[in-house]
Image (cartoon, rainbow, N blue to C red):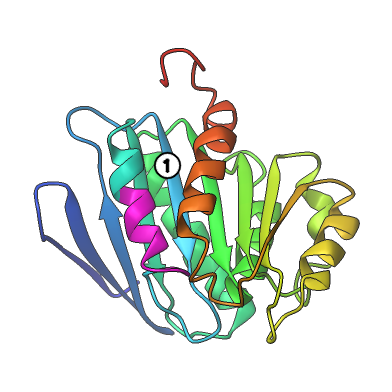
Amino acid sequence: MFARGSTDLTPQLTHTEIYTPQGLLTVFRTMPAGASPAAAIVACGGAMGGVLGPGHGLYVRLAERWAERDVASYRVGYRIPNDLDRCAHDVACAVEMAVDDGAGRVVVMGHSFGGAVAVRAAVVMTEEVDGVVTFATQSAGCEVAAALAGRPLLLFHGEHDDILPPESSEMVRMIAGYGDLEILPNDGHLLGRSDDAIVERLDDWLPPVFAFDAASGD
């Protein structure tokens, strides 16, 4: 790392740039108000990069929604998009940021190519990463999914994805040997019709992964 700079865009949103010999790593961090976060979401984009996520800025919506529940979010802008190993390292750096900020549990999320990135980051960070969520993931790069070793795995896929068919997520689930696969009806690769359904499913799925009390939400 050559240098690192951060600026607060809002009281809760920070833009961080990390300069490395391999390029510029960007992280948008949304923090809950008050003390250190109880948990964290680390999210990454597809082969072209990006920090908004699938749907209509799904990652931004999740960041704002879960900040109200004492969960920080880190949206990763890759140094070199479509370089699987380097992108997984970028996500691992964001996971370390979350842990340094005090997050006790971390879930990584990735869309398309980013699904493989999330899986690979989780495989090498067995102590830090507690769960994985993929959106329309590719199966290439997920050959190591069995090494998730039972940590919670949730896969979303559009029924009519014409870039990566739903069988891609099914293959990842088969390699892992477990996982919850949600096929989203009448939707494609960008999951533009399923924002609400995804948010609602994550409302149920994330709290036990974060070890939140079901009654209190924290």
* Above or below: residue 127 compared with residue 61: above
Q: Is residue 55 magenta?
A: yes
Residue at the extreme top: 215
Q: Is residue 121 visible?
A: no
Please provide percent x and percent y for residue 31.
25, 43
Q: Nearer the viewer, residue 172 or 136?
A: 136
Q: Residues within 10 Å of mark 1 (few under 14, many from 20)?
A: many
What is the span of residues highlighted in magenta in the rendered image? 53-63
Residue at the extreme front: 186
* Above or below: residue 195 compared with residue 80: above
Would residue 87 be found to the left or right of residue 131 on screen?
left
Residue at (46%, 53%) from the top-left corner?
196
Please provide percent x and percent y for residue 141.
75, 74
Please provide percent x and percent y for residue 177.
90, 49
Q: Nearer the viewer, residue 215 or 74?
A: 215
Q: Nearer the viewer, residue 187 or 47?
A: 187
Would residue 1 be found to the left or right of residue 173 on screen?
left
Quadrant of the rendered image containing residue 38: top left
Q: Is residue 93 magenta?
A: no
Which residue position holds label 1?
Answer: 40
